[in-house]
Each structure stands twice: as structure tokens, then as C-alpha cells.
Image: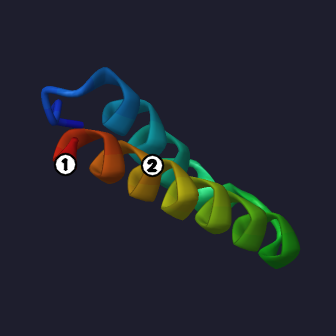
Amino acid sequence: MESTGDERVDALVHRLAEVSELAPRDQLEVFEAVHAGLQERLAEAED
């Protein structure tokens, strides 16, 4: 997987790569956590 140049974003994207191995209920938790993490990172970038 290619780097985004941001270690925190890379870690979140890496979590998405593993989601297909999880049960649907667990997938939702990962999607929500990744979404929240990306929103937080974007908010920090705007400051």
C-alpha cells in the first residue's frame, strides 16, 4: 500500500485493508473509528 505521507492517515487506511476479514458488526466499528480518525486529522490540518 502506498503511503499518504501522513503516518496517522496511513495507520487508518491500513485498518481498512483488514476489514474484509472481520464480521459485519466488527466492520462497522472499524469504519466508524476510521471515519472519526480521518475527520479529526482533517480538522487539525485546517488549523
Q: How many marks?
A: 2
Figure quadrant of the C terminus: top left
Q: Upstream in the sequence, badge 2 or badge 1? A: 2
- Please identify the quadrant where the N terminus is shown: top left
* Rendering quarter of residue 20: bottom right
Single out the mark in the foreground, 2 or 1.
Answer: 1
Q: Secondary structure at mark 1?
A: helix
Question: Can you say whether 20 is above or below 17 in the image?
Answer: below
Left or right of 41, for residue 46: left
Residue at position x 54%, y 44% in the image: 15
The numbered mark at residue 16 is: none
Compared to residue 2, the image places residue 21 above or below, namely below
Amino acid tagged 2: Glu
Q: Is residue 27 left or right of residue 47?
A: right
Q: In terms of depth relative to the viewer, which is nearer, 44 or 36?
A: 44
Secondary-structure class at tag 2:
helix
Give how far across and how far down residue 26 sits, in percent. 82, 64
Can you identify the residue that label 2 sits on? 40
User: From the viewer's perspective, is residue 10 above or below residue 38?
Assistant: above
Query: Residue at coordinates 73% horizontally, 73% vertically from top-left?
Result: 28
Q: Residues within 10 Å of mark 1 (few under 14, many from 20)?
A: few
Residue 17 at x, y percent in the picture: 47, 50
Please tell me which residue lies in front, 4 or 23.
Answer: 4
Horizontal side of residue 42 vs 22, given as left or right = left
At 39% across and 46% down in the image, what residue appears?
13
Which residue is located at x 15 percent, y 36 percent?
4
x and y, in percent, of residue 41 in the image: 36, 43
Image-based side of 14 in relation to 33, left or right: left
Q: Quadrant of residue 3?
A: top left
Q: Which residue is mark 1?
A: 46
* Residue lying at the far top of the rendered structure: 7
The amino acid beneath tag 1 is Glu
